[in-house]
C-alpha cells in the first residue's frame, strides 16, 4: 500500500485541491467529504475552512459546528486522492441529517486501492485528537457497499436506518 497522509489545506495547495474537486464532480456529480461553499475563490475557501475550525462547540442544539478539512495525499507523487472532513462534535443538524462525525471521499480514478480504509484510519486518529471522549457516528447509504464495508471494518454498529429512495444508515464506532 502506498503511503498516504492527511494534509490540512493551505493557499499553496490550490492546484491540488481544484484538480481533486474537478475530478470528483466530473465522476460523481457531487462533492463528498469536503465542506464546500459555492462562489468562493480558493483564497476565500481556505479562509472559510479556517473559520469552520474556530467555531466553538457549546451544545448539541447549536446550528453551526466546528469542522476540519483535510486532503488525503499520496506521498509518492503528492497527489490528492481523497478528502476527509472531521466534525468532532455531533450537533442536532448533523445527527438528524445523517451526516455524522466523519465524511470522506476517494477520487473515482483511485478507488479499489484500499484508500478509503486508510482515510478512515487516519480520520479516526485525528478525530480522537480533536474529541477526547465521544464515540464516532458515521453515516452512509445502505446502497454504498464500499463505504459500509469500511465502517464495519472499524467496528461500526448499525444504530439507525431511514428508508427512502436510498436508505440512510447511521453507525456507532466505539472509541476503543
Image (cartoon, grey):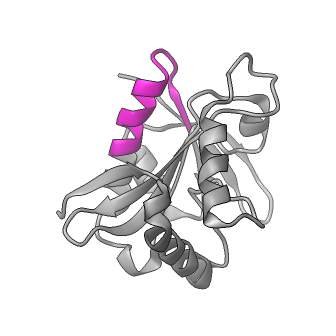
Quick one: 114 or 89, which is closer to the camera? Answer: 89
Quick one: 136 or 31, which is closer to the camera? Answer: 31
**Where's the C terminus, which quadrant?**
top left
Establish if 164 lies above or below 22: above
Quick one: 113 or 51, which is closer to the camera? Answer: 51
* Residue 163 spot, x, y in % from top left: 77, 54
Q: Quadrant of residue 43?
A: bottom right
Q: Quadrant of residue 138?
A: top right
Q: Is residue 165 left or right of residue 151?
A: right
Q: Is residue 141 left or right of residue 129?
A: right
For the point 47% across and 53% down, the residue is 9
* Residue 15 spot, x, y in % from top left: 46, 74
Is-magenta flag for residue 51? no
* Residue 109 spot, x, y in % from top left: 40, 81
Q: Is residue 94 left or right of residue 49?
A: right
Q: Is residue 155 left or right of residue 32?
A: left
* Residue 83 spot, x, y in % from top left: 48, 58
Work out whether residue 141 can be spotted: no
**Where's the N terminus, which quadrant?**
bottom left
Is-magenta flag for residue 123? yes
For the point 59% across and 57% down, the residue is 34
For the point 59% across and 53% down, the residue is 46
Work out whether residue 103 can be spotted: yes
Residue stretch rendered in magenta on the structure: 122-137
For the point 52% across and 80% down, the residue is 23
Amino acid at each position: 500500500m502506498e503511503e498516504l497522509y492527511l494534509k490540512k489545506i493551505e493557499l499553496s495547495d490550490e492546484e491540488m485541491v481544484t484538480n481533486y474537486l474537478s475530478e470528483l464532480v466530473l465522476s460523481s456529480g457531487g462533492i463528498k467529504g469536503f465542506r464546500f461553499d459555492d462562489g468562493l475563490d480558493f483564497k476565500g475557501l481556505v479562509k472559510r475552512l479556517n473559520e469552520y475550525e474556530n467555531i466553538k462547540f457549546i451544545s448539541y442544539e447549536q446550528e453551526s459546528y466546528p469542522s476540519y478539512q483535510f486532503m488525503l495525499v499520496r506521498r509518492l507523487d503528492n497527489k490528492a486522492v481523497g478528502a476527509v472532513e472531521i466534525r468532532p462534535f455531533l450537533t442536532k443538524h448533523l445527527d438528524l441529517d445523517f451526516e455524522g462525525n466523519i465524511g470522506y471521499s476517494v477520487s473515482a480514478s483511485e478507488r479499489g486501492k484500499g484508500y478509503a480504509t486508510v482515510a478512515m484510519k487516519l480520520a479516526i486518529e485525528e478525530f480522537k485528537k480533536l474529541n477526547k471522549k465521544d464515540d464516532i457516528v458515521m453515516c452512509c447509504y445502505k446502497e454504498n457497499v464500499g463505504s459500509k464495508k469500511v465502517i464495519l471494518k472499524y467496528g461500526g454498529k448499525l444504530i439507525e436506518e431511514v428508508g427512502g429512495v436510498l436508505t440512510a444508515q447511521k453507525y456507532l464506532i466505539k472509541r476503543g
